[in-house]
Image (cartoon, helix red, strand yellow):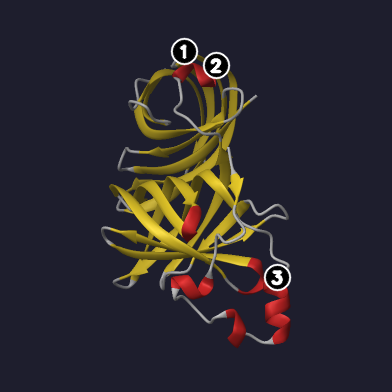
Amino acid sequence: MVHRLSALIPLAALGLGLPLASLSAPARAAQNTCPTPVLGRYAVMGMGVQSGSGKNTPTAHVQEERWLAGSKLQGTLVERVGRSERQATYSGVARMGPSCVLQLERKLPWGTERSEVVLDGKGRPLYSLNRNTGSVITSRWLPMAPGSCQASDLNGLVLSSQVGLSWRNGGWSPNAVVQREQWSDGRVSGIALSSYSGVGETASYSGDLKLDPNSCWGTLNERDAFGTTYRYRALLVKGRSGARGYYYLQSDLDDLTAGWLVRD
């Protein structure tokens, strides 16, 4: 799934930040002990807020990102910003910063996004923080095996716990959901325990997942026992044997929810 390349982050070649020779001796020593970032494909999910025009707007995203040789990034992003949704493919660059923090810069149609990633001892990303001014957004990373996905990769039991926001009476109010669901070849049925603004509800639901061609992305449509419909963009997190689970981002504009649903 992944390969190591000791020259993944050549600072001088990127022209970003200070060359190693200009760093202090302790800083150079720290650089030399940093784990080499692991090349490969990653699934990313994040939530937070963006500030602007005197207000904070909730946001959430799911993305698939590839770390390539030569310090390059490529990816696909689906993002909610308040009651709007946008999607884009992008490219970018990476460099190793102080304290073994990997700095990422992505070129998106609506602007440049900068974030910083903490790596584990083997050089794999676990968590990141958006560094754009006005953003308070954290993300979680999971490695993905190579290749496209099949709906049957989710077959079996899937569990989740998630939080989100719902647009009610001109403002955002909190919600939380716990789910237990069974998958069979792209069809799902389950039970959802939820609380919307402190009002509890339990409902069964069913739905189907349609994957994009030659991809791990898909569209998930669900309907609960009360007749309410839900629509999500989903990214299957491909593992060595089936999917590890899936990230999803709700497309219904009055509900802003991102979740990690774990395959048992």
Residue underneath mark 2: 155
Separation of residues labelled 3 and 1 (CA atoms): 47 Å
Relative to 157, 35 lies left or right: right
- Residue at image coords 59%, 42%: 2
The kind of residue tagged 2 is Asn
Disc 3, SS: helix
Q: Report crowding for label 2: few under 14, some 14 to 19, many 20 or more residues within 10 A (C-alpha).
A: many
In the rendered image, residue 187, in percent from the top left (x then y), is placed at 44, 14
In the rendered image, residue 259, in percent from the top left (x then y), is placed at 50, 39
Residue underneath mark 1: 185
Image quarter in which the C terminus is found = top right
Disc 2, SS: loop
Instruction: Return the residue nearer the eye: 10 or 45.
Output: 10
The kind of residue tagged 1 is Asp
- Labels 3 and 2 touching (C-beta < 8 A): no
Instruction: Return the residue nearer the eye: 254 or 247.
Output: 247
Image quarter in which the N terminus is found = top right
Relative to 197, 170 lies left or right: left
- Residue at image coords 54%, 16%: 155
Residue 151 visible somewhere in the drawing: yes
Q: Residue furthest top?
A: 184
